[in-house]
Every structure is written in structure tokens, then in C-alpha cells.
Amino acid sequence: GENVEQHPSTLSVQEGDSAVIKCTYSDSASNYFPWYKQELGKRPQLIIDIRSNVGEKKDQRIAVTLNKTAKHFSLHITETQPEDSAVYFCAASMGGGSQGNLIFGKGTKLSVKP
Amino acid sequence: EAGVAQSPRYKIIEKRQSVAFWCNPISGHATLYWYQQILGQGPKLLIQFQNNGVVDDSQLPKDRFSAERLKGVDSTLKIQPAKLEDSAVYLCASSLGTGNNEKLFFGSGTQLSVL
């Protein structure tokens, strides 16, 4: 079945620096890759997503890149702020008949130090 | 727009007891998901409904877990009997349609502690 690996598990940066989180997936039929931010005790919230027909997508300080050949995708956060501190999860859609099912990575705990 | 509603927010039970969780998806969303999130891990899909039918329950431990969405709106997830390893946050999510690549919106979850 689909497997999603996420690295690093923890990431600490200084305010204003950039943060990069990387994920790899195993199912070549996956074609949808969302990123979720989860603050302590709160629900996961979608922050950006990318589909397989696009190589890069940007939304203000957040960008996601996708390399379908290598089966990896990355989240880039520029000019980090303390409020970016949270756990970030990548996910990949399952191919085949399981429409909409997402397989999640184990998460990256991002700490932005002021 | 109202989000996905879940209750209760917290639940503490002893092993071998039963527990039920409730979810009300975003109005008009056809697809509903139950995810289990163990501390320190990403959410894991338990079951997916499309309207009132089950699309995927391959990872649902059917000897103790059951779920229903009788009228295609609200859903309940039940565990009977609970085990210590069931301690987790149970997240409900919904999406608008039934096609692939639909955006999922999560509820706040029910945090279950099994003692």
C-alpha cells in the first residue's frame, strides 16, 4: 500500500529564516498532495495543496514543490514567524479506487524561535 | 461557514468499556471520513463514507470498531470493547464531492483515553 515518509521529525529555526520539510511517497498513482498544519490540541488545517499536473505552487510565504519522477514533494516556508510553530503533516492521495483517501506522514514539529 | 462538528471533546473510559463518538460534517459534503491519530503520529484512515454508503473500511478493526452514517449526514463511530491501544484522537473529516483530490476539512476531534 501507499507509504509516506516525512523528514525531519523536528525542525528549529530562527524567526525570519526559511524552513523546508520533505516528503516521499511510494504509490506512483498518487496525484494529490496536501499539507496540513496542526497546532497543539487543535484540528489539522489545510494550508496548501498541489496536484500532479503542477510542479510548484506558492501562496504568500508558503510554497510547495512536487517531483513526480522522484516521488517527492516539499513544503517551503519563508520569513518564518513564531506563529508558524506547529506540527506540519504532508499527505498523498491513494490511487486506484480509494477516492480521496489520504495517507499522512508522521509529522514535523516546527519551532520558530523569536 | 460552519465547520465539522464533533462530540464529545474528551472521553475517559476503562478498558473493555464501550464508547461512541458523533460527527456532523459541513453542510452539503457528501463524503465523510473517520481518522485515528495516535500521539506523535499522522492521522490514519479508519473508514470513508460516500453519502450513506461505505467506500473504504479496510483499516477499520471490525471486531471492535463500527461506524454508521444512516441518513447520509451525521455519523457515529463506536468502539466496543475498548483496549488500551485505542487511546488516540478520533478525527472526523468531510469533503464536498466524491471524486479524487477533494479537500478534506477536519473537526476538532475527540480525545479518547482508555485506562
Image (cartoon, rainbow, N blue to C red):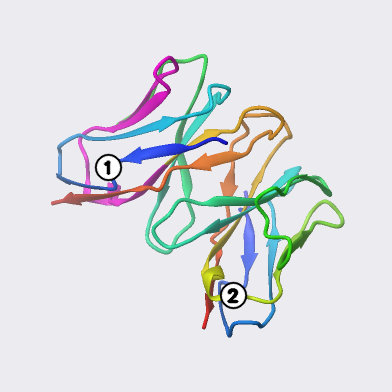
Residue, disc 2: B83
Visible in this render: residue A59? no
Mark 1 is surrounded, within 10 Å at the Cα level, by few (under 14), some (14 to 19) or many (20 or more) other residues, namely some
Task: Find residue B26 and report its horizontal and vertical position in percent.
Answer: 68, 50
Mark 1: secondary structure: loop
Task: Tell me the kind of residue under disc 1.
Answer: Pro
Task: Tell me the kind of residue under disc 2.
Answer: Lys
Mark 2 is surrounded, within 10 Å at the Cα level, by few (under 14), some (14 to 19) or many (20 or more) other residues, namely some
Viewer-closest of A59 and B97: B97
Tag 2–tag 1 contact (CB < 8 Å): no
A71 falls in the magenta region: yes
* Disc marking residue B25: none
Mark 2: secondary structure: loop
Task: Find residue A31 and report its horizontal and vertical position in percent.
Answer: 55, 23
Residue at 52% in and 14% down:
A53
Q: Is residue B95 left or right of residue A25?
A: right
Q: Which residues are magenta?
A: A62-89
Task: Find residue B30 and report its horizontal and vertical position in percent.
Answer: 76, 42
Q: Is residue B99 above or below residue B10?
A: above
Viewer-closest of B114 and B20: B114
Q: What is the chain letter for disc 2?
A: B
Q: Is residue A86 left or right of residue A38?
A: left
Residue at 53% in and 40% down:
A103
Residue at 69% in and 61% down:
B23
A90 falls in the magenta region: no
Residue, disc 1: A8
